[in-house]
Amino acid sequence: MGLVAAGEVRLRHLRLGPRRPPQPAPWIFWEARCAGMDRNFDSLGRRLHGPIINSVGPFPIPSLPIMCRCKSPLPTNLLNKSTSTCTPNRLDFNHKNDKISELIPVVSTEFINFQDLSSKILQNAVKAFSPLRLRLGGSLQDLVVYGTGDTGAPCSPFTKNTSAMFGFTQGCLPMHRWDELNAFFQKSGAQIVFGLNALNGRVPMPDGSMGGPWDYTNAASFIHYTVSKGYDIYGWELGNELSGSGVGTRVGADQYAVDVINLNQVVDKAYQGSKPLVIAPGGFFDAGWFTELVAKTKPNQMDVITHHIYNLGPGVDTHLVEKILNPSYLDNMVSTFSNLQGILKSAGTSTTAWVGEAGGAYNSGHHLVTDAFVFSFWYLDQLGMSAKYDTKSYCRQTLVGGNYGLLNTTTFEPNPDYYSALLWHRLMGTKVLSTTFNGTNKIRAYTHCSKDSEGITLLLINLSGNNTNHIYVNSEGAQEFAHPHGAKEHRRSIPKLGETAGLTRQEYHLTAKDGNLQSQHMLLNGNVLATGANGAIPKLEPVQVEGTEPITVAPYSIVFAHIPGFYAPACRLEEVLVGEKQSMLTCK
């Protein structure tokens, strides 16, 4: 999002003490796992030319923040009984003044099982983020043809073929299935990003890449059909993981740029007035490849450039928790976010960046890690970090499926990250403030102007299991504070409370049940979060704290603190420009 010049939040570490629980009392972007457990890597994390097939069947629709897609191949019955979706966690920023920015949680999923869609919990989980943005795509999207009648061939489903790319033959999406899907999308109010087949018409090259131009005839027919039916599409994304060295295969950036321009022309011809976003490439970041794509599609041919993140490595890694709790490891992603923003700024393009898919650990994650409380440390840190570097949307893998779903695969009961995403969605506004924390590197701190309310909201993540931190917040001024710590006395300079004095703030303390980081149950201010009667999502109620008191961050805990009395010029509500991504406040 860029840093806000109009205000800086300074945090000072006040005291490290013995472990204390948070005060009792009474925030996507995710991607739903698709048809398989593979991510085109083996158990050692080595990239494969073809996928490891481990079909576990279709999964229901995901619903959380950001644009994502599944890495596994789609099930053979995808075109007849299921589809993949992604709900992006969206970050929207104003490049004109670098003040307005929004990171919206989005969830990604590959398939929808219509029988499962009757679940009250699932319905309520989706509605909580209404409107939900879903991304339909995945590894097999580049093998899908659309049954619009223009090909002259029968509309046949995928069939297994171990010698074929991704282990399947080409498959067809019948328009009656597309109609049924859109009936659900319209009923649920979902916003759709659809991943188009970018390999149609290309030929295999000796070096393993795919050569020749994209044949967009079938895609254009499909887009025109969609428009004729009045189906609302938020964005059309070209291809999946074909950038750089690719996954399974690759396409050169020069040719890809030509193809993106052709897609933009197809969309221009199909739509009158406002049109969906043109998005590409949905692959892993490669600086040289991305630089060429941006340079050859500027200034207005590509609206969004998407990249995928699985920085924790393979799900079978037994050191995932250690990586998540290591601030230096988390910081490794800074270079990717920073480099991509550098490319966009240097090019002078209007293209914005999204994280198109992120599940942390590929090959379906790791049970009791990527679906447990500890993963909220990684997830929320990613949201905060990506927003800081002007990422407009962040898509989480996944809503349902694999071991990194926001919802339990069988019961749909929300996993901890669901509640983390929901709090982010409700509390973090569209402007990002520069945040400085002077203290232990185990505290991760991010600040946004509050969403639809006065003041700021601060996100604090404590990666330490031993220390309780007491933090004061201010933008100017300092005073001396002495305190005993063991046998020694430390003196630190801490900010004055200023405008917050005499006012209360709202705090949301997130901890693991029984202090077990690998628990799938999260506590909010000491109370277990669980669905109620008829699958109702629980109310996320804060505790009220006197503004003069420091924010207490317990060991291994996460705190959202809404400080309505904190004065930051960039956060004055009247400064939000009409029409400048205002819709993001309600639809991202």
Image: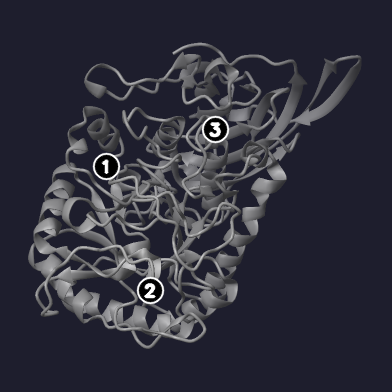
| Residue at 40% over, 37% down | 406
User: What distance separates the C-alpha of mark 1 from that of mark 3?
Assistant: 42 Å
Q: Which residue is mark 2?
A: 302
Disc 3 crowd rating (10 Å Cα; few below 14, some 14-19, many 20+) is: many
| Residue at 26% over, 70% down | 170
Instruction: Determine which of the numbered discs, if any, sits on residue 469 in the image.
Output: none
Q: Which residue is mark 1?
A: 60
Instruction: Determine which of the numbered discs, if any, sits on residue 566 in the image.
Output: 3
Mark 2 residue element: loop
Q: Is residue 88 visible?
A: no
Q: Earlier in the sequence, mark 1 or mark 2?
A: 1
Mark 3 residue element: loop
Q: Earlier in the sequence, mark 2 or mark 3?
A: 2
Mark 1 residue element: loop
Question: Is 498 located above or below residue 326 in the figure?
Answer: above
In this view, the mark in front (1 or 2): 1
Q: Nearer the viewer, residue 222 or 38?
A: 38
Counting from the top left corner in percent of width and height, residue 39 is at: 47, 56
